[in-house]
Amino acid sequence: MLEEPSAQDALQGFLPSILPAGIHVEYMVFEGKQDLEKRIGRRMRAWLRPNTSFVVLRDQDNGDCRLIKQGLMEKCREAGRPDTLVRIACRELEAWFVGDWVAVAEGFSLPRVADWNGKAIYRDPDRLGSPVSELRKAIPAYQKRDGARRIGAHLNLQRNCSPSFKVFAEAMHRLAG
């Protein structure tokens, strides 16, 4: 369950690299965080397929990630799905991309961008105020969906500096067994 289409674009590229064959992923994309929070319970209650694990991914934006996660987990409990994995992308999904400039360079065929991996400002991209602005410094024409499609398949768990990306990827790996 995702707040925006760019998250689906990125995950469709990345998840096959960490999930075992045979795991089917179904993406439910909402029209922003308010839509996600409003409709999550109804969508979970209406889901009829057995042996399903739910994962919710939402951007932190300017909120308190603990409160956001707590609120989403409460909605999942109310929907009868207390086992749902809830993860927050700190500050926004693009921090995951800024955490791996090699993936950005590969996705856009711009080898020089890989050198940005060594810059101190990007050692903890989850603390950046606007990761998408950082991407636009390297790629002025950067667009969220196009960037997510290009970069997602190149993201690397071992190389990525984003703590929220690592927590998400490791949790998905564990969930898949």
Image: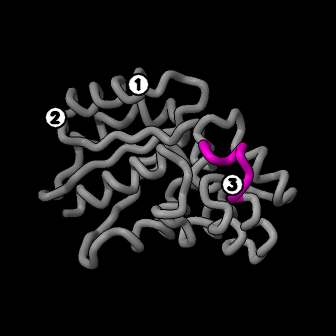
Name which quarter of the figure residue 151 lies in: bottom right
Looking at the rendered structure, the secondary structure element under dot 3 is helix
User: CA–CA distance between discs 1 and 2?
Assistant: 21 Å
Instruction: Say which of 105 and 142 sits in front.
Output: 105
Question: From where the camera sits, is residue 30 visible?
Answer: no
Q: How many marks?
A: 3
The residue drawn where x is 40% and y is 58% is 27
Looking at the rendered structure, the secondary structure element under dot 2 is loop
Looking at the rendered structure, the secondary structure element under dot 1 is helix
User: x, y percentage for residue 79?
Assistant: 21, 33
Q: Is residue 4 left or right of residue 140?
A: left
Name which quarter of the figure residue 100 lies in: bottom right
Q: Is residue 78 left or right of residue 107?
A: left
User: In the rendered structure, which disc, 1 or 3, sits on the residue that comes first in sequence?
Assistant: 1
Q: Residues within 10 Å of mark 3 (few under 14, many from 20)?
A: some
Residue of label 3:
144
User: CA–CA distance between discs 1 and 3?
Assistant: 25 Å
User: CA–CA distance between discs 2 and 3?
Assistant: 33 Å
Let me know if residue 61 is in the magenta part: no
Residue of label 2:
80
- Residue range of the region highlighted in magenta in the rendering: 117-124
Q: Is residue 95 left or right of residue 134?
A: left
Whether the residues at callouts 1 and 2 have beta carbons within 8 Å, the answer is no
Let me know if residue 120 is in the magenta part: yes
Residue of label 1:
66
Tell me the colour scheme of the image.
one colour
User: x, y percentage for residue 137?
Assistant: 84, 52
Instruction: Say which of 76 and 100 sits in front.
Output: 100
User: In the rendered structure, which disc, 1 or 2, sits on the residue that comes first in sequence?
Assistant: 1
Q: Amino acid at mark 3?
A: Lys
